[in-house]
Image (cartoon, rainbow, N blue to C red):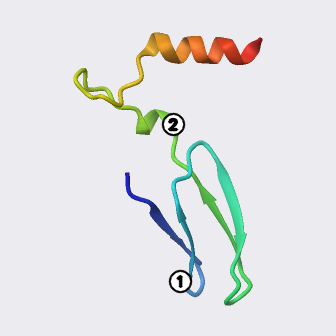
């Protein structure tokens, strides 16, 4: 997976590179001082639904992980 570039909305200066998942980040530009807010993509958009994919997370495994967090 390749990192996405996040740039200032005002001056287009590169602020950071990364992958935002189910998150929101607020960054102040060191160039022009404007405040920028970036929202990440939903985790669901990053899941692989192909049966033969080695990175696929099975639904049962995900449910077990969520239930384990509640303990």
Total marks drawn? Answer: 2
- Marker disc for residue 69: none
State whether residue 42 is above or below residue 7.
Answer: above
The 10 Å Cα crowd at callout 2, few under 14, some 14 to 19, many 20 or more, is: few
Q: Position of residue 47 (x, y in %)?
A: 40, 32
- Where does label 1 land, which residue? 12
Q: Position of residue 24 (x, y in %)?
A: 66, 53
Position of residue 40 in the picture relative to residue 68 (left or right): left
Q: Position of residue 37 (x, y in %)?
A: 66, 64
Position of residue 27 in the picture relative to residue 52 (left or right): right
Q: Which quadrant is the C terminus positioned in?
A: top right
Q: Quadrant of residue 65?
A: top right
State whether residue 60 is above or below residue 49.
Answer: above
Q: Position of residue 44 (x, y in %)?
A: 46, 33
Q: Earlier in the sequence, mark 1 or mark 2?
A: 1
- Marker disc for residue 43: 2
Do the residues bearing badges 1 and 2 touch, measured as CB atoms within 8 Å?
no
| SS for callout 2 | helix
The 10 Å Cα crowd at callout 1, few under 14, some 14 to 19, many 20 or more, is: few
Q: Residue at x 47, y 10 (%)?
A: 60
State whether residue 59 is above or below residue 16.
Answer: above
| SS for callout 1 | loop
Position of residue 18 in the picture relative to residue 47 (left or right): right
Q: Residue at x 71, y 63 (%)?
A: 26
């Amino acid at each position: 997976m390749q990192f996405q570039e996040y740039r200032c909305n005002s001056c287009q200066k590169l602020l950071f590179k990364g992958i935002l998942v189910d998150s929101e980040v607020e960054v102040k530009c060191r160039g022009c001082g404007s405040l920028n807010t970036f929202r990440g993509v939903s985790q669901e958009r990053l899941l692989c639904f192909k049966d033969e994919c080695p990175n696929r997370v099975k639904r049962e495994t995900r449910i077990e992980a969520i239930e384990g967090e509640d303990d």
